[in-house]
Amino acid sequence: MEARIRDSYEFPTDLAEEADTRGALRWTIGVIATAAAALGLTNAGAISGWASSFDPQPGVIVLVHAADGWDEATAKLGLGAPHARMHKAWKHMEQARWSGGGAVVEQAALDAPAPEQGPATQR
Amino acid sequence: MLFPTLSFGLFFLLVFALTWSTTSNDWRKLVLLVASWIFYGAWDWRFVPLLIVSAVMNWGVAALIARDDDRKRRKALMLGGVVANLVMLGFFKYFDFFAEQAGSLLELLGVRQDPALMQVILPVGISFFTFQGISYAVDVYKGRVPAARLLDILLLMSFFPHLVAGPIVRASDLVPQFQQKPQLNRGMVTMGLLLIVWGLFKKAVIASELATAFVDPVFEAPMMHGRIDLILAAYGYAVQIYCDFSAYSDMAIGIAALLGYRFPRNFDRPYRSASLQEFWRRWHISLSRWLRDYLYIDALGGNRGGKARVYRNLMLTMLLGGLWHGAAWTFVIWGGLHGAALCVERWWSRASLTKAWVLPHWAKVALTFHVVVLGWIFFRASSFGDAVAYLGGIFAPQVDTMTVTPLVVGLILFGLAIHALPWNAMQRAAERLRSLPAPAFALGLAATMLVVDAMRYEGVAPFIYFRF
């Protein structure tokens, strides 16, 4: 049996030996901004999918155009390829069945372009 | 506005920028308060005033209790506050349920009358913020916490990371944090970001994939599935609800950390429990402690008053805990099952003739897990009849079909295997990662999120606990 069952409140974000707060906010902003930029470049389809999820209104149409343009621009540079490849591989795994000695794949579905969405997409 | 969406991401970035750019702590709290109301209003604006009224009422009751020296009046005020919270919860959550039950009872007695259903809409998170309000009033009455300022109580009850699905953060934990301007440190931020990404993975990949690809179809038509499907769907739901709910808690803790606040742990690998008592120390910890402290001990008397009273208190606590989850008999049965199992465990551990019968640890874990899974079948089923049909299908299946896929089995095994990780595995990882330069950590984080996004199920289903 596990040696200890804790009964006092624990705060998972309290790490050992951390007192220095100097530069932490700047470091955090750097992490969030860099990660957001990297995701914006490699998963632009998510932004496009998110923009198209709103009801069409003048402002939304501008947003959708901009998001689609950004998606196309990053796609031309091949930046969306890793996401698309991983998504395709995941779809293969979803389609795999026990029978038939391996993956039974709906080829038509897999050959279709990968859905463009991301952590961001809401349907 | 669900956590794993771009809308929430943009909302959070704006809130993050505004809160860290304010110089005064009061302005910071005002920004967070308005942001929390906007977040809550994104579901239904009509209930924002309800949230405010609830917070003001609890603040007022606590302020009156703190000012009064008369013991009887203090108690009356506390009880009045508790009753007001329960009336609010009872009306929105249980009115239609009890009206329906009353109608059925009258029909049994030969009186035909249509129940006066009001089709009351359930405000998201009401079960959480009313419990928080009750705990604040009781804590001030018991002298556990001093009465706080209105702004602090408004923010305590409205703070958006925990507002709609917990954890139930008590005043003693959060109000002292609100009273001084928080400071970030790298460890807190690293751990917060890891919890957010881990939560995203558990919710968007494991829980969503299991629900849509397997668990939902099996529970919707159990008679169309064979024994293996039914057993695996029950295990699958156990993994799904853990990954769904613990994901929300992880993300809430992570989001609060990025804003400079600490929330307590809400889950601790519950399926490695060797007893039901241990399970409730690891599952939805903030609720089980709330039920223990305010219902089992404060209201019912806890372990005082003899054996029969202790068993009664255990049963009542779990039955009411079940009802807290939803206005349906399936939840009451789920709570009753846990209460009965806790009573049997207590009796077993104290009966002298059972001392010779000691199960090995692995057998206790397996037994506890299967009792929990049995409870989940009632918890997940739409009705008592559906749950019975589901169990009947396991013992006497009507068909022999098997629809479970290798991926689903893999996800179930993965969801169980993560319970074997050390309790501080993520903290140890965060301790290493916090010393990385910002670009290196950010690129690792972005790459992980990209992988998670590629695996996620299309769209985002609401969290299971939103309806509680």
Image (cartoon, helix red, strand yellow):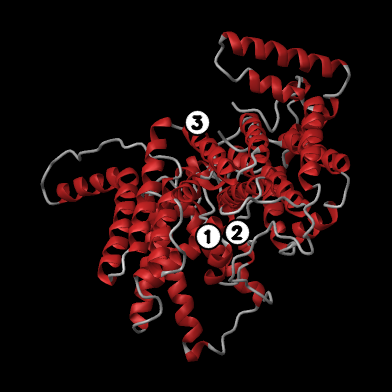
Task: Judge whether B392 appears above or below B11 on screen.
Answer: below
Q: Residue at x 73, y 40 (%)?
A: A99
Using the numbered discs, state the Cα–Cα distance from disc 3 to disc 2 in whole angstroms: 26 Å
Can residue B392 be spotted in the picture?
no
CB within 8 Å, label 1 to label 2: yes
Q: Is residue B151 left or right of residue B12?
A: left
In which quadrant of the rendered view does residue A15 lie? Answer: bottom right
In this view of the protein, which residue sits in the foreground, B291 or B325? B291
Label annotation for residue B264? 2
Q: Which amino acid does the dot numbered 1 rest on?
A: Ser
Mark 2, chain letter?
B
The local crowd at label 2, few if under 14, some if 14 to 19, many if 20 or more residues have their Cα within 10 Å, is many
Tell me which label, 3 or 2, sits earlier in the chain.
3
* Tag in front: 1 or 2: 2
Where does the N terminus of chain B fall, quadrant-wise? top right
Tell me which label, 1 or 2, sits earlier in the chain.
2
The local crowd at label 3, few if under 14, some if 14 to 19, many if 20 or more residues have their Cα within 10 Å, is few
Can residue A52 be spotted in the picture?
yes
**Element type where label 1 sits in the image:** helix
The local crowd at label 1, few if under 14, some if 14 to 19, many if 20 or more residues have their Cα within 10 Å, is many
Q: Which amino acid does the dot numbered 2 rest on?
A: Pro
In this view of the protein, which residue sits in the foreground, B412 or B460? B460
In this view of the protein, which residue sits in the foreground, B88 or B240? B88
In which quadrant of the rendered view does residue A90 lie? Answer: top right
Q: Residue at x 81, y 47 (%)?
A: A23
Mark 1, chain letter?
B
